[in-house]
Image: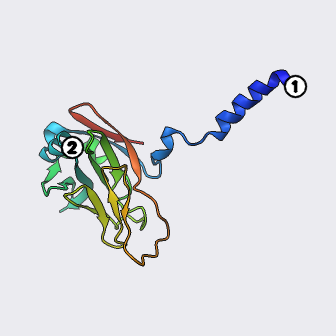
Amino acid sequence: MKRFLPLFLSVFMLISCSDDATSMFSNREHVYCAFDVLRSDVLFNVMGNYGQFASIRRRVVDGITQIELVSNTGLKGYYPSDKLVDNFGLGLGGLIVGTNNFGEPLCYDLACPICDRVDRRLTLTNDGYAKCGKCGVSFDLNNSGVIYKIPENADLPVKRGLYRYRINYNGQIVNAYN
C-alpha cells in the first residue's frame, strides 16, 4: 500500500484541481468566427488601439444578413457577408472584441450575463465599460469583464462577470472561439 501512496496522491491532486486556466472561458454558447481587420475600419481601430472595443452582432436588414460592428468610440460599420460569415457562431447576443489597456486581445458575449437573454445586449461606453440597460449593471472590459458597478437596491438573480471566449489575434485576423 505504501508504494501506491504517491500514485494515489498524484491522481487525487489531478482530479481535485479544477481551477485551471480554462475555467475562465465560457462554453455556454457556440462561438467561432474569423474576421480580417483589413476588411473593417472598426475592427482595425479597436484591435490596434489599447482600451478600445467593438460590438459584433448579426442583423437581418431587408432579408439580407449583415454583421454590424459598433466601437465604443462611436465608429460604426458592416463586415462583408458571405457563406462563411453567415455560419459564424456569435454567442448569445453577439460579441465584444477589442484590446484592453495592456494590449491583450479580449472577447466577451454581448448579452448581459445577469439578465441572460438574447435581447438584453450591453451598451459599450467610451471609457471601457459595458452597461446593461435593463438591470443597470456595468462591467469592466479592461479587467476580464468583471462587475464594475451594481445599482443601489438592485435585486440580482446572479452576480457574475461577462461570458468570456478565447481569442487569437495575429495582427490581421481576429479569431474568437470556444
Quarter of the figure with the C terminus: top left
Question: Which residue is farthest right?
Answer: 1
Q: Is residue 106 above or below residue 136?
A: above
Give the residue pinned by disc 1. Answer: 1
Secondary structure found at label 2: loop
Q: Residue furthest top?
A: 3
Horizontally, residue 87 falls left or right of residue 51, namely right
Front in this rendered view, residue 8 or 166: 8
Residue pictured at 15% horizontal, 55% vertical: 73
Residue 109 percent across, percent down from the top left: 36, 54
Image point 30% across, 65% down: which residue? 131
Residue 40 to residue 161: above or below: above
| Amino acid on which the number 1 mark rests in the picture | Met
Dot 1 or dot 2: first in sequence order is: 1
Q: Residues within 10 Å of mark 1 (few under 14, many from 20)?
A: few
Q: Is residue 24 left or right of residue 109?
A: right
Q: Is residue 88 visible to the viewer in this orientation of the structure?
A: no
Q: Which residue lies at the image location 83% right of the left edge and 21% below the top edge?
A: 3
C-alpha gap between disc 1 and disc 2: 57 Å
Q: Secondary structure at mark 1?
A: loop
On the image, the x and y values in percent for residue 57 come to 27, 55
User: Badge 2: how crowded within 10 Å, few (<14), some, or many (20+)?
Assistant: some
| Residue in the image at 31% along x and 64% along y | 121
> Would you say 95 lies left or right of 127 here?
right
Question: Mark on residue 50?
Answer: 2
Q: Is residue 126 visible?
A: yes
Place of residue 138 in the rendered image (x, y in percent of width and height, measured from the top left): 33, 64
Say which amino acid is labelled 2: Tyr
